[in-house]
Image: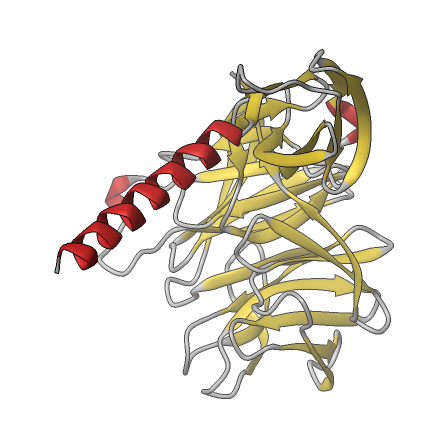
């Protein structure tokens, strides 16, 4: 019995000693600490090395790519402007007389500049169908094209701006939930939500002529056209680029960030004067995105756009942005709103 007890105590002490030794051998990043780093900032790279250890050299990596090497544990400096927005893994290999120890730290690269803030002024108001659960909106040839959602009542519509009258429409199958919409030449592209398919119509007849499957972007939320390619959202902070002829995702995308971090819930999209305007779902906010970098350059606060007296029990959130390129007019509305507004941006 005594032998068993002695062996047990010895085993416990051995484990404790090994654990203590491992802690003594542990290295970590002294700089940088986990958290946000503004794009363009110089990152100081240095390890916290236990006092009982020496350092021959340290090799530093960013996302498995060597960026610098130090002799001893002297700090090295790295220009973050070469990185993209989002999480970046910094790794270090510590060399000491043939022994190699590793440590890593996760940082997030964010834009250095906060978005410019905008309010709005209402220029004009137009009637809007309170039964329209607006998901996508487009203005061309003097009329609006609108995609509405909800299972059992999703549709594609051509709408007279001045009266809100539906001039032409087609209903989607009850199993499809309509989402974003855009127009390329004589084709209308309409997304569905979780069904994984996009629908392509003849612009004049509304006859469906094609379907396409989503790929990396598994859900359909918003879509717009920049004159060369389609840009699609899926409810995350990522925007996907699609070929305008085949509707296939090109493999290119941008991740959308502001100075605080990722901007999720990107919904209905519109391309306006070289920028992407996006509704942020469940909010009264529209963000203005640089399509090259994904940086949020501006925020449009739409609180109070729809008067409280016009809100009913089923009135839903802000959603729907359209642009009259010829006359430089911006139109916005919401799900089951009774009004569509022409607005102009006002710097705050």
244 relative to 213 in the view: left or right: right
Most foreground residue, 310 or 210: 210
Asked if residue 248 shows in the view, the reply is: yes
316 relative to 57 in the view: left or right: left
Most foreground residue, 283 or 343: 283
Specify the quadrant of the image occupied by residue 250: bottom right
Asked if residue 31 shows in the view, the reply is: no
Most foreground residue, 220 or 238: 238
Vertical arrangement, residue 44 with respect to residue 282, above or below: above
The residue sitting at 74% across, 33% down in the picture is: 98
The residue sitting at 57% across, 24% down in the picture is: 29
Q: Quadrant of the N terminus?
A: bottom left
Position in image of residue 296 (x %, y %): 62, 33
Position in image of residue 226 (x %, y %): 79, 50
Position in image of residue 218 (x %, y %): 59, 69
90 relative to 227 in the view: left or right: left
């Amino acid at each position: 019995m005594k032998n068993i007890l002695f062996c047990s105590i010895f085993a416990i002490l051995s484990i404790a000693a090994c654990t203590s030794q491992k802690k003594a051998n542990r290295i970590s990043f002294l700089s940088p600490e986990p958290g946000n780093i503004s794009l363009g900032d110089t990152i100081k790279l240095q390890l916290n090395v236990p006092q009982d250890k020496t350092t021959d050299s340290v090799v530093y990596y960013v996302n498995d790519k060597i960026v610098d090497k130090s002799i001893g544990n002297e700090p090295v400096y790295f220009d973050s402007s070469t990185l993209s927005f989002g999480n970046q893994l910094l790794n270090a290999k510590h060399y000491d007389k043939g022994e190699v120890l590793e440590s890593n730290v996760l940082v997030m690269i964010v834009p250095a500049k906060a978005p410019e803030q905008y309010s709005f002024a209402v220029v004009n108001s137009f009637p809007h169908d309170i039964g329209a659960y607006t998901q996508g909106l487009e203005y061309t040839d003097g009329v609006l094209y609108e995609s509405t959602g909800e299972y059992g009542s999703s549709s594609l519509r051509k709408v007279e701006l001045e009266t809100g009258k539906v001039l032409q429409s087609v209903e989607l199958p009850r199993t499809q939930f309509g989402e974003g919409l855009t127009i390329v030449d004589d084709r209308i592209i309409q997304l569905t939500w979780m069904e994984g398919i996009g629908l392509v119509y003849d612009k004049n007849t509304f006859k469906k002529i094609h379907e396409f499957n989503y790929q990396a972007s598994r859900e359909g939320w918003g879509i717009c056209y920049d004159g060369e390619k389609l840009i699609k959202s899926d409810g995350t902070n990522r925007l996907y680029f699609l070929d305008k002829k085949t509707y296939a995702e090109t493999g290119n995308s941008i991740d959308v960030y502001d100075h605080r971090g990722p901007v999720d819930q990107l919904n209905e999209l519109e391309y306006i004067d070289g920028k992407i305007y996006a509704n942020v779902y469940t909010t009264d906010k529209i963000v203005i995105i640089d399509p090259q970098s994904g940086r949020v350059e501006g925020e449009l606060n739409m609180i109070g756009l729809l008067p409280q007296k016009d809100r009913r029990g089923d009135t839903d959130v802000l959603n729907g942005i359209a642009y009259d390129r010829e006359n430089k007019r911006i139109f916005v509305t919401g799900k089951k709103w009774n009004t569509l507004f022409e607005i102009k941006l006002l710097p705050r």
